[in-house]
Amino acid sequence: MLNYFKIFSRTCGFKPHQNSLAQCFRALSSSSSKYSQGAPVTPVPEITEKYPHLKTHKDIYDFSLENPSEFWGEIAKSYLQWMEPFHTVSNCDLPNGKISWFEGGKLNASVNCVDRHMRSIPDQTALIWERDEPGTEQRITYRQLYDQVGRLASALLQHGVRRGDRVAIYMPTSPAAAVAMLACARIGAVHSVVFAGFSAQALASRVLDAGAETIITSDQAVRGGKVIELKRIVDDAVRECPSVKRVFVATRTGAEVPRSGIDIPMEEAMEAAPAECEPAAMDAEDFLYMLYTSGSTGKPKGLVHSVAGYLLYCMFTQKQVFDLRPGDVFGCVADIGWITGHSHVVYGPLATGGTAIMFESTPVYPDPGRYWEMVQRLRPTHFYGAPTALRLLLKHGDSWVTKYDRSSLRVLGCVGEPLNHEAWQWYNDVVGDKRCSVIDTWWQTETGGVCLAPRPSAEGAEIRPGMPMRPMYGIEPVLLDEKNNEISGEDVMGALCLKRPWPGMARTIYGSHQRYVETYLKPMPGYYFTGDGAHRHPGGYYQITGRMDDVINVTGHRLGTAEVEDVMDEYEPVAETAVVGFPHELKGEGLYAFIIMKNDVTVTDQEVKDTLKGLIRNNIAGYAVPDHMLIVPGLPKTRSGKIMRRILRKIAANQPDDLGDISTLQDPSIVEQIVQLHRQQVQ
Ligand code: WT7
């Protein structure tokens, strides 16, 4: 039924009938010897075969910036399987918020991730589910994945889900969740995966914002030996979401869980539905999915990714940044609730015809050797994790690592926050035995894929600790000063912006394109503003210095301080709050809440703190609960009433002697009072 696809103009040296990228890679590895010194670690034959004068990594990078249409056009033609060819590679007008790639093209993401590999490598393992209980992993081949995606897609249609509908997915990291994502993609529904650690309130607000009528969940989740009552949480959320018409419930543990009239047992529905489901022919710019992330206001943003541009950029970075080779097993331990799980557990590995691990557990369950015991057992070539986990593990000592065989590993990646020198060294020396490449990748939910990383680069090019270093092909990072002028030269710092559009960038914020334009495109007109500051080192290498807005990074999770403040302000006895981040040895950043009570309250300080913690846990998630809460008589405010967070940040960081000029405050004496309370209660 699938031979109506028009696969046109393959240019990377493989024949049209070779539909799998794994085969493509195999074809490439034999031809890589012809590259001269300075050639990229991972070749880009789609470009160099058509433009033979491009030889070095620098040649190709420069070409990608100067000729984006030629560059991305060739990559798109050979990486993606199209139902209809595109006629225009790029049609973007950044200052005005218009981003459009591959116009005229039609394709389906599930076909690209599953069908083409099901035909060429049906028995290859697509997903290895590393379940919470060690040693109970399950493997699923491309043939099985095809069958399951088709059945669930058919079942979604049978139950009334339509193209363009939003579907919330609230599930543990598992093949069932990947199947749910791909089944949505197959029928053209827009999935919105909500991290299964979020509370019922957080789930409800995301379901409402998306106008989702369908939720896909599991009976329970199991993480670190603990059971989480997912279905119960979904029921709580649904009570506040009148729009929800159906809840598909997959089986994770098989325990008895509450039922409701709108439930549909997922496996039964799949059993009853046909495995063949015609894929929807999606326009390149149609929405593939949305994913919520925190911003500097209290309301999370539903970032929207496109079918063609996202999938292409995700695939291309999967291969180039991680030097992917045939037969590799990609071990990304991220949860599917975050962008890393979308791009490097599901879409990137599957679109490239690879094998991906899906990690359901925690780094310390049942003990701090979990990752490396898994590596010995599953033999991945790549391990991709978070700096916060590495910092935690290095504290437990080397023997948890060295007692396991890690010889399968070739590339060690990390993402989410800066990888400090100590953790970098440990990752490189102990985990990688000094023989793996350590790849610190910088990107965001908004960028869809990696934008800065040590690779791609020229063969043998150095990797420096503590920075993501080099831009990806097609990415032009610049630093801007306060007047929005580009800062040139080396050893300089500024606001990190990306100067030109790239296919993987988020297209909009669901329901508010204006907010998208105002957040990312208006602050520095003509540029995409990342929200991060960066330092450009000699050699042109980039290091991230941290967020420039009121967003903090707790254990690799992005959190808007306003989100936490909004929840606390709801509590009747509270008059006002201010939340700031402070450096935290393990978490990266910790949260510090300053709280002013109303005058006439009778509750004790301890009751207030306990209530607030519960509220934050229920409204957001456990990781949003502040490390410190300090009840203060006032906050440092300017005469216009603006809280001077700079001062609170200094106090939270235990640097009260370095507060700078406080004379412009309405009441400078309040600062000393806060410092005293901090010394007595926190320091
Ligand atoms: C923010 C994006 C992309 C997946 C994980 C996070 C910070 C990300 C790095 C890095 C320093 C980093 C930035 C960025 N960040 N990677 N390698 N070095 N900081 O996605 O939740 O969208 O957060 O994480 O501040 O803006 P996210």
Image: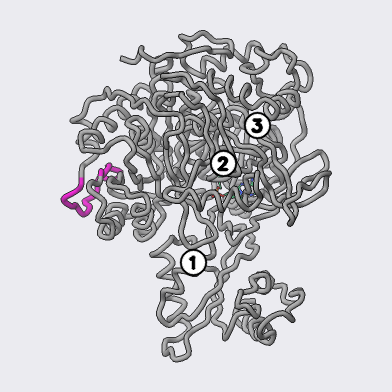
**What is the span of residues highlighted in magenta in the rendered image?**
248-263
Task: Tell me which numbered mark, 1 or 2, is placed earlier along the sequence.
Answer: 2
Tell me the amino acid under the disc marked 1.
Answer: Val
On the image, the x and y values in percent for residue 23 come to 52, 14
Q: Which mark is residue 474?
A: 3
Does 217 appear above or below 330?
below
Left or right placement of residue 114 versus residue 548 in this view: left
Pick the residue in front: 625 or 470. Answer: 470
Q: Which mark is residue 564?
A: 1
Find out if the beta carbon at label 1 lies less than 8 Å from the nearest ligand 1 atom: no
Give the SS element for disc 1: helix
Task: Give yes or no for residue 149 being in the magenta stretch.
Answer: no
Residue 422 lies, in percent from the top left, at 71, 50
Q: Report the side of 540 relative to 99 (left or right).
A: right
Decide if ligand 1 comes within 8 Å of the CB at mark 2: yes
Q: Quadrant of the C terminus?
A: bottom right
Q: Which label was assigned to residue 447?
A: 2
Q: Position of residue 381 (x, y in %)?
A: 57, 30
The residue located at (60%, 80%) in the rendering is 635
Type of the residue with mark 3: Gly
Predominant secondary structure, magenta span: loop
Task: Report x, y in % for residue 58.
Answer: 75, 26
- Crowd class of label 1 (few under 14; some 14 to 19; many from 20; radius 10 Å): many
- Residue 390 visible from this viewpoint: no
Q: Secondary structure at mark 2?
A: loop
**Residue at figure coordinates x 62%, y 83% from the top left:** 677
**Residue at 35% in and 27% down:** 145
